[in-house]
Image (cartoon, helix red, strand yellow):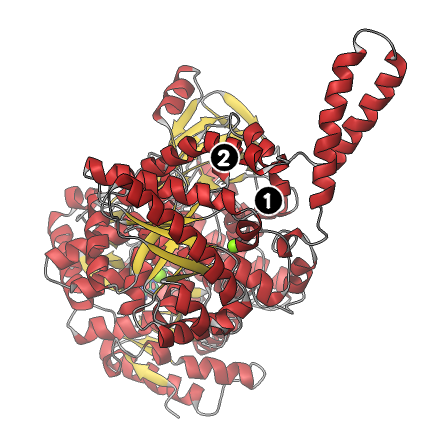
Amino acid sequence: EKWVYLFDEGRGDMKDLLGGKGANLAEMTRIGLPVPPGFIVTTRACNAFQAEGNQFPEGLWEQELAALRTLEKRMGRTLGDPGNALLVSCRSGAKFSMPGMMDTLLNIGLNDEVAEGLVAETGDARFVYDAYRRLVQMFGTVVLGLPHEPFEHVLEEYRRQRGIQNDAALPAEDLKAITQAFQRIVREKSGRDFPKEPLEQLRLATEAVFRSWNGKRAVDYRNAAGIAHDLGTAVNIVTMVFGNRGEDSGTGVVTTRNVSTGEREMEGDYLANAQGEDVVSGTRPTLRIAALKEQHPKLHAQLERICQKLERHFRDVQDVEFTIERGKLWMLQTRDAKRTAQAAVRIAVELVRERRITRKEAVLRVKPEQVDFFLHPRFSSAEVKAARERGDLLATGLNVSPGAASGVVALDADTAERWSKEEKKAVIMVRPETKPDDVHGMLAARGILTSRGGRTSHAALVARQFGKPAVVGVSEMEVDCEKRQLTVAGRVLREGDTVSIDGTTGEVFAGRLETVIPDLSDPHLLELLKWADEFRELGVYANADYPRDAKLARELGAEGIGLCRTEHMFFETERLPRVQQMILARTDEERAETLAWLLPFQREDFLGLFRAMDGLPVTIRLIDPPLHEFLPNHDELLHDVTELETRLELLKDKPEAAGLEARLVQKRRLLEAVESMRETNPMLGLRGVRLGIHLPALVRMQVRAIFEAACQCTREGVRVFPKVMIPLIAHSNELRVEKELLEAEARDVMKEQGLEVAYQFGTMIEIPRAALTADQIAQEAEFFSFGTNDLTQTTYGISRDDAETGFLSEYLQKRILPENPFATLDQRGVGALMEMGVKLGRKTRPKLDVGICGEHGGDPKTIAFCHRIGLDYVSCSPYRVPIARLAAAHAAL
Ligand code: ADP
Ligand code: MG
Ligand code: MG
C-alpha cells in the first residue's frame, strides 16, 4: 500500500486520505504557491498503526525514508548532516480541522553537532539554539508526555534574570544553556535521553502524532464537534522555514476576510522574529497584520495577492499560516476559515455578489442553527450606560466571538464544568489563556474571558466555533489562578463573583447586566433568507396567540398562523371569574349569559390577529384543555373550606359569621364542581373536541367570535382566511358532529352580517387513531395539522408533563432511547404515523392541506422530514421562523 505522498503527488480533494492540512498543502503546491517541500503519511497509515497495537504497518518506514531522500535531494540538504542540515516539522492533520487538538513537532533534525554546524553556517547562534530548545521541549511534552511547567519555569527564570518579557530577546548563550537544562529535564523526568539520532526523532515524532489522534482533548473535541472517531490523522513532514531569524523574519496567521464580521479585509496576527506557535498560543502579544504592511509593504502585498488567489481557488474564505524567512514568504497551511454566524452570512452573500458562488451554494453554506445566533442576547444599551455610570466597565479587550453573557467567574475548566453542570450556574470561564485541554470548561461556560491571546488564539477559535461569546487579550487584567482572583481597573474580583462580557464590543463589566434579544434586521441575513425562500417548497407559519406575536412572526417571514391557542384568552384576570361562572352554571340560561359577556372579548382577540395577518391564513384552535384548569386547585380549595369551617365554629353567632358563611357556600360549590370534574388521567379525559361536544355553547361562542371578527375585518378591507381547527379528534364521527354544529353557527353569523368569508374547518392529528383513519377523517376535515407534542405523548404512552423529570431522563442516560422524543421528532414511530396520515388523508382529498404545529416544527431535522413526507407547511414559534425558512430551503436543495 502507498502510505506516503509527496506534496506534488496529492490534491486538494484527497482530504480523506491526506487529511485537510496535507491535501491543501499539496493543492497549494500544485497551483504554484511557495510551500516548503514535504510529504504526507496517510490517515490509513494512522489507522493501520492503531490497529496493529501502535506499530508501524509494513513498508511505512521505508516509504517515509524514501520520501525523505527525495526531499533531501530537492533541498540539497541532509537530515543530520552537521555541515548541511535539513530540518523538518512533523505535523498532525485530520480530515476535519481540529485546531490545536493534536500534536506537532518543529525543528526535527537538531542535535549538538548539527546545532554547531548550523551556527557555523548561519552565523546565528541565537536562532539555532532557539530552535533547538523548542525541539527538546516539544519532544519532552509531546512524545514523552511530560508536563509543560518544568520547562516554562526554566524559561521564566532566565527571563527574570535578564529582566525581559519575551523569549525572543534571550541571548544565544542563555538559549544554549536552556537547551541543556531542557535535556536534563527530559532525562530526569522520563528516564531516557533526548534522542540524538535525527531519524529516531522523526520516527518517534510520527508515532506521537499518530497517538495524539486518541489523546483526551482530541477525543473531547470530536465528541463536541460531532466528528467520527475512526478517521485517523495524517502526518505531514515539512521542510522547516524559520520565522525566528531576526527582524526580517516572522510568522503569522490571517484570514482572507474578517471572520467576526465578514468584512472584506485581510485580518489576523503577526509576530516578527518568532516561530509559528508563538502566535497561536498567545504567549507573546501579537501585532495586527497591518504591522507587516508598515514593516515590509512588499511582503504584505504579496500575502494579499496570495490570499485572493487562495479564495478564488478554494471558493471560500481561507485561514492561512505563513512564515517569512529573511524576506521570503512561505505558505504553511490553508483551510476554510471558521467564522461567526454573522460573518458566515455576510461572506456567503458577498461571494454571490462577487460571482464566486451560486445563490444555492450560499444558502447551503449557512447552517439553520447559525441563524439562531442573530437572536443571541445582547446587553441593552440602557444597561450598558448604567453600568458605565456605576464605574462597572472594567476593561475592553478583543471582541472575538459575538453575543453577551453574564455569569460567575470560574478560573479553570473543571470548576467551570462542575459549577455549570452540578450547580446549574451561569459561568464565565476566565483564564490567562486557554489551551486545548480547557475545551470541556469552555463548552460548559456561557462565555470566555482571557487576559492574553489574539483574534486567532485558541480561545477565540473555539469560542467562535461553538457560538460562545468571548473577549480575549484583556492585557490590563491580571488573572491569578493561585489566589483564585483577578485584578483589573484597580478592582479585585474573586472566583465566584459575577462578571458580564460582551463579545460583540469586547467590553467587560463587573456584576450582572440584563440581556435583550436583538431584532433580525441584518441586511445580509435578509437577503440570504430571501434566496432561501426561492428554493424552499414548504410553507413556514408561526404559532402565535397574540397580535404582537403575530406581527413579529410576520416580520420574520411567517406566511400565516399555524396555531393560535385560545385557552390563554380565558385566563386574563378580568375574564377568569366569568369563565368560572360559565363552567359552574347550573342552567343553560346562566351559561348563555356569561358566554354572551365573554363574546366581545374573544372577538377583539381575533380582530387583532386578523388585522396583523392581513392577507394570510390564521389557524385558530378551539379550546383544548380540561376545564378544571380554569378552576382553583382542588387541595387548596379543600384547605380553604376546612379553614373556613373551623373559623365559623369559633365565631358562631357573632356578626362576622354571616360574611364567612357566604364565602364558605361559594367555596364549597367550587370544591364540589372541581371534585365532580376530577379525572384520574385528565390528559386523556374531557378535553379538546370532547369538551366542545359536552359544552357546545362554549365552542359556538368561539366560532361566532371568529366569524364576527372576520366579517368586521372584511368590511374594513382586511383580507381574512380563518381556519377553524378542532383538537384531539380520534374518530371521524366526533368531527362530523362538531363540524355540523359549528359550521351552522358560522353560516348564521355570515347571514346576519350579510357577508361571505372564505374559511376552512379542519383538525389536529394528535391521536394515533386519527392518523390510522385519516382517510375517514379527511371526509370531514379540509386541513390537517399534526400536533406532534400530543401525538408523541399518545404514541409513546409517555406523559409529556412528567417526561423530563421522570423515568425518561433515566432512559436517556442508559441510552435506552437515543433522544428525547419530545425534543427531536421520533421519525421512525411518530413519523410513520404522520406519513400514513398524509397518505390516507390525501387519498380521500387529494388537495388536503397538511402542516405541523408541534414544538418540533422549528427543528431543522424535523423540517427536512416534513419536506420528505410532503407536508405543505411547518409552524413554529416566531423566533424560529427564520431558522425554519433556511432549513426548509436546505431540505429542498
Ligand atoms: P496546528 O494544527 O496546531 O496549527 P501545525 O501543524 O499547523 O499545528 O503547526 C504548528 C505551528 O508550527 C504553526 O504555526 C505552523 O505554521 C508552524 N510550522 C509547522 N511546520 C512548519 C515548518 N515546516 N516551518 C515553519 N513553521 C512551521
Ligand atoms: Mg496550523
Ligand atoms: Mg394537543
Say which of 632 and 514 sits in front: 632
> Dot 2, crowdedness within 10 Å: few (<14), some or many (≥20)?
many
Quadrant occupied by the N terminus: bottom left
User: Relative to residue 328, is residue 138 drawn left or right?
Assistant: right
User: Relative to residue 3, is residue 218 drawn left or right?
Assistant: right
Q: Does 377 sit above or below residue 510?
A: below
Q: Secondary structure at mark 2?
A: helix
User: What amino acid is at disc 2?
Assistant: Leu
- Residue pointed to by mark 1: 420
Asked whether residue 786 is in view, the answer is yes
Q: Which of the 4 image quarters holds residue 767?
A: bottom right
Residue 76 in the image: x percent, y percent? 24, 77
Say which of 758 and 618 sits in front: 758
Asked whether residue 154 is in view, the answer is no
Q: Secondary structure at mark 1?
A: helix
Residue 217 in the image: x percent, y percent? 53, 61
User: What amino acid is at disc 1?
Assistant: Ser
Q: Which mark is residue 595?
A: 2
Q: Does 417 sit above or below residue 655?
A: below
Q: Are marks 2 and 1 in contact (CB under 8 Å)?
A: no
What residue lies at 39% left-to-right and 51% top-to-bottom? 744
Say which of 18 and 675 sits in front: 675
Inter-mark Cα distance, 2 to 1: 50 Å
Whichever of labels 2 and 1 marks the residue nearer the N terminus, that label is 1
Residue 585 in the image: x percent, y percent? 61, 35
What residue lies at 20% left-to-right and 67% top-to-bottom? 314
Q: How many marks?
A: 2
